[in-house]
Amino acid sequence: MRLTDVQLDAIRELGNIGAAHAATTLSQMLMCQINMSVPEILVVDIGRICDHIGDEYSAMVVFQLQGELEPGGYIILLVSRESALRLTNTMLGMTDTDRELGEMDQSALLEIGNIMISAFLDGTAELLGIVMLPSPPELAIDMAHAGMSSLLATMDADIDEVILFRTELMDEEHMVNSDILFLPDTRTLADILRLLESIVGPM
């Protein structure tokens, strides 16, 4: 499905709303002000996604998309190891960034991912007038390419394109680079575009 410029603008605005909800919820969770850059949006062929996510050691919090739009797809929070440690340190009251991601970090990342992606979907679903929910999260910590390749090999949805929202989350002390990867099933993407068209007019 080749998206037009108008469709891309509509999806970008949808991503802005979702990411703003995620940043607000993260601020409340971490009890500090989180500011968010305007998301960069990329729509890429699923076979080329690894060209756009780098190959650093990263944490991936993976959800299946559930709710009214069947069959759904997947949504992923991807953060580098350095950014993941900054997030978990803030949540856990720690300062050491020269360590491995341990069990407490992994538990914190699952909670952070769940909070952020739930808020992202709440914001976008509210605009669309539907219900979108994340499944319970799964965590993978690996080189980004390897983790994504493993995930793609297990997917059973009909997915042609990945919508990548690239954001920077900043508090007074730190900057956290994060990517939200939205992998809607082809039919789900068509439904989202149809709903957006009913809101903004012909696209």
Image: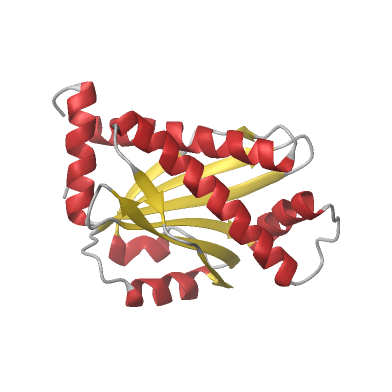
Describe residue 133's horizontal placement relative to residue 71 as left or right: right
Q: Is residue 163 visible?
A: yes
**Residue 143 in the image: above or below residue 59:** below
Q: Quadrant of residue 109?
A: bottom right
Whether residue 4 appears in this view of the structure is no
Image height of 5 relative to 44, above or below: above
> Residue 107 is drawn in which quadrant?
bottom right
Residue 172 in percent (x, y) is at 77, 34
Q: Residue at x 56, y 54 (%)?
A: 113
Image location of residue 176, percent across then percent down: 65, 47
Q: Is residue 26 left or right of residue 86?
A: left
Spot occupied by residue 91 in the image (x, y as percentages of width and height): 75, 51
Residue ID at (46%, 41%): 120
Closest to the observer: 186 or 26?
Answer: 26
Q: Is residue 89 left or right of residue 122?
A: right
47 vs 173: above or below = below
Q: Position of residue 81 (x, y in %)?
A: 66, 63
Write the residue at 30% across / 62% down.
46
For the image, the number of numbered tags is: 0
The way the protein has been coloured in the rendering is secondary structure
Residue at far left of view: 202
60 vs 97, left or right, is: left
Residue in the foreground of this view, choosing between 127 and 175: 127
Task: Locate the C terminus by quadrant.
Answer: top left
Image point 35% across, 37% down: which residue? 125
